[in-house]
Amino acid sequence: MPLTRHRRPVGVALALAALLAATAGDAAADEKADCIHASERAQRSRMDGKLPQARSDLLVCSRPTCPAVVRQDCSVWLSEVTQLMPSIVIVAKDPRGADLVAVSVRLDGGVIADQLDGKAISVPVGRHTLRAEHPGFKPVDVSLLIREGEKARSVEVRFEPEGSAPAEGAGSNGGGVRAVLPWVVVGVGGAALVTGAVVSFVGLKNIPDQCNFSTQSCEPKTPDDVRQRAESGHALVIGGLVTAGAGLVVGVGGLVWHLLAPADAKTAGRMHITPIWVAGPRGPLAPGAPAGAALGGSF
């Protein structure tokens, strides 16, 4: 009888030990499966360019508790993905150029920063729309193309007060949005230069052989209609030269304007161009009329 009483507790202890061993085995099997699944998800995310998700799964499958083969592969992939993961540093400015900190930032609608601290923010590869918001100012939207391996890419946003023209981001690496109007001025100048050259050429062709452009004279006994044609050609030449010279000045001025304009120039939409009226032999000319008609000569 005493022997029987001692066997019962020993049997219970053995049963508990077996149950614990089985539970531990199941937990180890589950953890092994989690490691394998995380490794597979990481590879798919890497192929799809979803580097943040890939890195998150690689951190799981590179844990010391994962199988050695899986852990070694995940550790290598983790290093590679970390090198490829791009990041941006957002710089926010007020209209006076002062730095702003209380700025919330969204990327494709998802919040990536509640305020700025100067640190780099990891972002996915691909095309994105970044929106920065600051109380009392218009939101700023910036279109970005994020590339693999870009580290600490600077993205500057400049805020404008509510009610002003729509604000735009300054783009990456400090490059700003320059006004378009200087290039319009360059185009106008180039068109005037070409037009003036053509008008001068036509004027020269219209001067008869009996007349000389440089001396503004014709041979004796030249008919009046020929002299009038020579005067008209001379006027076209002079007018064309003036137009070409003005176009050259305007084009150069547009280039200088573009080079000297601040990166955040926003005044293009508020500029006005006043047409210049040129007096011609028959009265004022409307804008766009041949400038050569404003000048004449006597043969």
Image (spheres, rainbow, N blue to C red):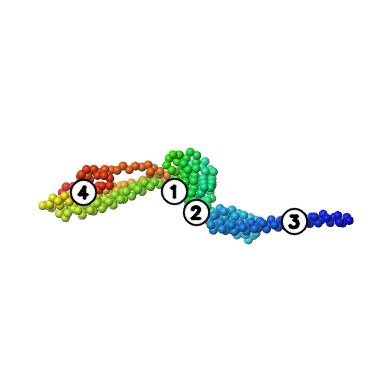
Please provide percent x and percent y for residue 183.
Answer: 36, 48
Task: Kindly indicate whether the residue at mark 1 contacts the one at mark 4 (C-beta within 8 angstroms).
Answer: no
Q: Nearer the viewer, mark 1 or mark 2?
A: 2
Q: Nearer the viewer, mark 4 or mark 2?
A: 2
Above or below, 65 relative to 112: below
Disc 2 crowd, CA 10 A, few/some/many (<14, 14-19, 20+): few
Give the residue displayed 40% in from the left and 47% down from the top. 178
Comparing 164 with 84, the one in front is 164
Who comes first in sequence, dot 3 or dot 1?
3
Cα–Cα span, label 3 and label 2: 51 Å
Q: Quadrant of residue 281?
A: top left
Q: Quadrant of residue 272?
A: top left
Who comes first in sequence, dot 3 or dot 4?
3
Who comes first in sequence, dot 3 or dot 2?
3
Residue at the disc numbered 3: 19
Above or below, 43 relative to 270: below
Who comes first in sequence, dot 4 or dot 2?
2
Three-letter code for the amino acid on which mark 3 is drawn: Leu
Label for residue 110? none
Q: Which secondary structure lies at badge 3?
A: helix
Residue at the disc numbered 2: 126
Q: Nearer the viewer, mark 3 or mark 4?
A: 3
Task: Kindly indicate whether the residue at mark 1 contacts the one at mark 3 (C-beta within 8 angstroms).
Answer: no
Comparing 84 with 137, the one in front is 137
